[in-house]
Image (cartoon, rainbow, N blue to C red):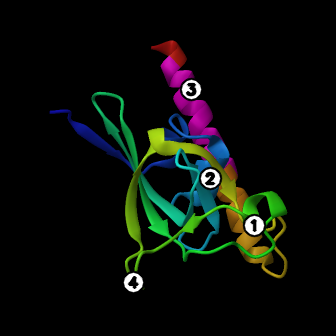
Amino acid sequence: MPSWTRLADPATDAALLPAWFVERMLGSDQGSFGLLLTTGDVLRVAGLRAAHLSSDGTILLDLTLDHAGVPAMADTAWQSKHYLGAPVPGAVQATVNLAQVVCAVEFQRSQTVGRPQEEEAMSATVVELRQAAEDATERQSVA
């Protein structure tokens, strides 16, 4: 039976997942993201809580689910997809095998209006995450 390591640190998770995915989703329960699954369905996600790495290489993602249905302003190419969300009200936690994810997308405008303090905090967090990822890369190249 494989052993599991829980990763909830953006710098560590960035090595496993695309940087934007970690920066935007980790610890967020207020986003609007989608994971296109190998079945063709889209899993609506509000945030990523942690990643779990197995000794056999399996990666599981702990997620907070969003509601089902086509996101507002979705491109016509995405409107025909089947959107999965929380199965019942209040049941918003899920774990997904990363091997079943084809791509990750964000379903919101990239420009936030009217919240300058939040924008500044997010920019600072992004800089910190990038620096942590660079530091981790440097440590790996030295080892």
Question: Along the polypeptide, which appears first: circle 2 or circle 1?
Answer: 2
Closer to the camera in the image, 93 or 38: 38
Q: Which SS class for mark 1?
A: helix
Give the residue drawn at x 51%, y 71%: 85
Q: Predominant secondary structure in magenta?
A: helix
Residue span colored magenta? 127-140
Closer to the camera in the image, 78 or 54: 78
Q: Amino acid at mark 3?
A: Thr
Q: Which SS class for mark 4?
A: loop
Q: Is residue 124 above or below residue 98?
A: below
Question: Along the polypeptide, which appears first: circle 3 or circle 1?
Answer: 1
Q: Amino acid at mark 2?
A: Glu
Q: Is residue 21 above or below residue 89?
A: above
Q: Amino acid at mark 4?
A: Gly
Q: Which residue is mark 3?
A: 137
Label 3: few (<14), some (14–19) or many (≥20) C-alpha neighbours in 10 Å = few
Residue 39: percent from left, percent from top: 52, 49
Label 4: few (<14), some (14–19) or many (≥20) C-alpha neighbours in 10 Å = few
Give the residue drawn at x 75%, y 66%: 120
How far, Cα to Cα, is label 4 from label 3?
39 Å
- Foreground label between 2 and 1: 2
Residue 21: percent from left, percent from top: 62, 50
Q: Which residue is mark 4?
A: 90
Quarter of the image containing the C terminus? top left
